[in-house]
Image (cartoon, grey):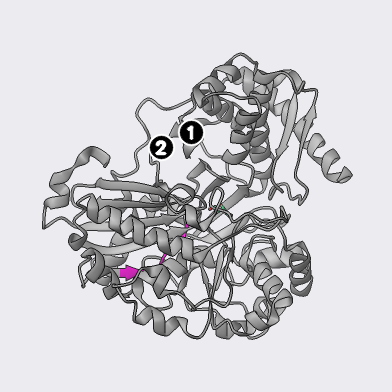
Amino acid sequence: MAGSNEKNLLNHMAKLFLGLDSSTQSLSAVVIDLDTRKVVYEKSLNFDQALPQHKTQNGVLPNRDPLVKHSSPLLWAAALDLLFAQMKKDGVALGNILAVSGSGQQHGSVYFNEKAADVLLNLNPKNSLVENLDGIFARKTSPIWMDASTAKECAEIRKKLGGVKYTASRTGSDTFERFTGPQIRKFYQTEPKAYDKTASIALVSSFLASLLAGKIAPIDFGDGAGMNLMDIRRKNWNHDAMKATAPSLAKKLPLLAASGQVIGPVSSYFVTKFGLNPEALATVWTGDNPASVIGLGLIKPGQMAISLGTSDTFFGTMEKCSTDESGEGHVFGSPAGGYLTLICFKNGSLAREKVRALYKIPDWKKFGELVSQTRPGNDGGIMLPWFEAEIVPRTSKPGIYRFDLDEKNVAANCRAIFEAQMLAMRLHSQWMQVAPEKIFVTGGASSNPQLLQILADVMNCRVLRIEVSKSAALGAALSAAHGWLVAANKNPKWEKLVAGFTAPVPGSEIRPDAKAARIYDKLVEKYAACESDVLDSI
Ligand code: XUL
């Protein structure tokens, strides 16, 4: 428990808000006290460990096709039950929670049949969520953001919409394999009968919001923009995109709404079973990246952050909607209004972990020490660490490529993977045209000072660590508070709301080294040439 602040939990006047985050590998909860501006509780539950009966590996169901990555909506529902039970056991004052919001891994989709609405309305607290939800899905599993099996559907939709530039300017992004529209098209083409039986399509975020609200929840403008189906400027479902994707889609998509908007009181399932207040509000959820923008306090345009998580993402707040003509980056709606810009690299932590495992390095401290034994620029050694099909640059063929880099040199390979990841980030973020004076960094690998120095040097920018291990769940809790204040006509200001929750770690600032920065100015060109060579040859 953060700070073991029992007083806050027991204080009956406390204004508590719950934020949940259903990520690729875990479900997390953060409870905040708005008056004391403190996180009073946080907990994470790892899917593979807590729910082994669902047979996931790192949150993904095994599949013979390396491009297919699905997970299970029942796993996410079971995790929700388990986490609420844990919060009750830990003495969280669930009766004092005024509103709940959440975030989910983006793009993943859930397919309800016509029974779902009724079942959601009548969730029986005597049974588990898994038992309650039996028979409400038109598709058993959910394609998630790691899926790369829809290249054909992407090409078809892009063509119908008039090419990369038009698709991006209309929906915020070019078509991407993991985006929900191409995934829906594949489902419609490969399982037309099951598609016909689909009454409503949810994202991971809106699926879990539906359980909490006891009714089909809206999709928000942040997560909705990750579907290639929403008009990014008008923030409504785009007719041409729906038509290019699958028939009768307009009937199957829920409403669009702002995240944090009140859906209604929480379902009585959670009141009876776990002691939530019957007046607590269920609100609209968003994607994990939009929620992190709030959790990290990136409210002002131009504020940028890097999250070193399962995927590495580079994102920030943008005033006007400006899309990437080359089609690599994305624009999503921001929960704080306006827009957020993002690029996503699939080979983040999992790739770093693979290198660590490959060279049998016992822990990240040792990994960092090995990096210190090498020089910035790695004497020209470069690695392309595409352990999984990569999103940026786009390739459906996994592979590890080394240039002027000896496979047996352990220390050089440790430096090489992180240098490659940061060089890719620098190269592929040029379209954003942002020149931040500082970058906030978060996520598991951000506790490693050697890696942060590489980041500062490659980006030639000051780097500050924000120690919010659960930035998405915190952002969701703040979103719940925002929604509750709006509903109470309190006219909340985002800047005031996030203040105090998200200060950078004191003394964590890392400054770029001018000499190293010059080395990377050159190396980025070699890195770009290596990328092009490999992409041309595979
Ligand atoms: C963003 C993306 C990932 C997931 C990870 O577009 O696909 O960052 O949201 O959960």
The answer to whether residue 211 is seen in the rendering is: yes
Q: Are marks 2 and 1 in contact (CB under 8 Å)?
A: yes
Looking at the image, is 287 positioned above or below residue 525?
below
Secondary structure under tag 1 reads helix
How far across and how far down the image is residue 486, in percent?
Answer: 28, 68
Measuring 27% from the left and 71% from the top, which residue is drawn there? Answer: 487
Q: Earlier in the sequence, mark 2 or mark 1?
A: 1
Q: Name the residue furthest right.
A: 537
Secondary structure under tag 2 reads loop
Measuring 67% from the left and 22% from the top, which residue is drawn there? Answer: 518
- The label shown at residue 432 is none
Question: Where the N terminus falls, by quadrant?
Answer: top left
- Kindly identify the amino acid type of the residue bearing the numbered disc 1: Ser
How far across and how far down the image is residue 322, in percent?
Answer: 61, 58
- The label shown at residue 466 is 2
Residue occupied by mark 1: 446
Compute the Cα span from label 2 to label 1: 9 Å
Measuring 21% from the left and 72% from the top, which residue is drawn there? Answer: 279
Q: Quadrant of residue 142?
A: bottom right
Q: Name the residue furthest top.
A: 373
Q: Horizontal placement of 117 versus 169: left or right?
A: left
The foreground one among 538 and 161 is 538
Q: Main secondary structure of the magenta part?
A: strand
Q: Which residues are magenta?
A: 282-287
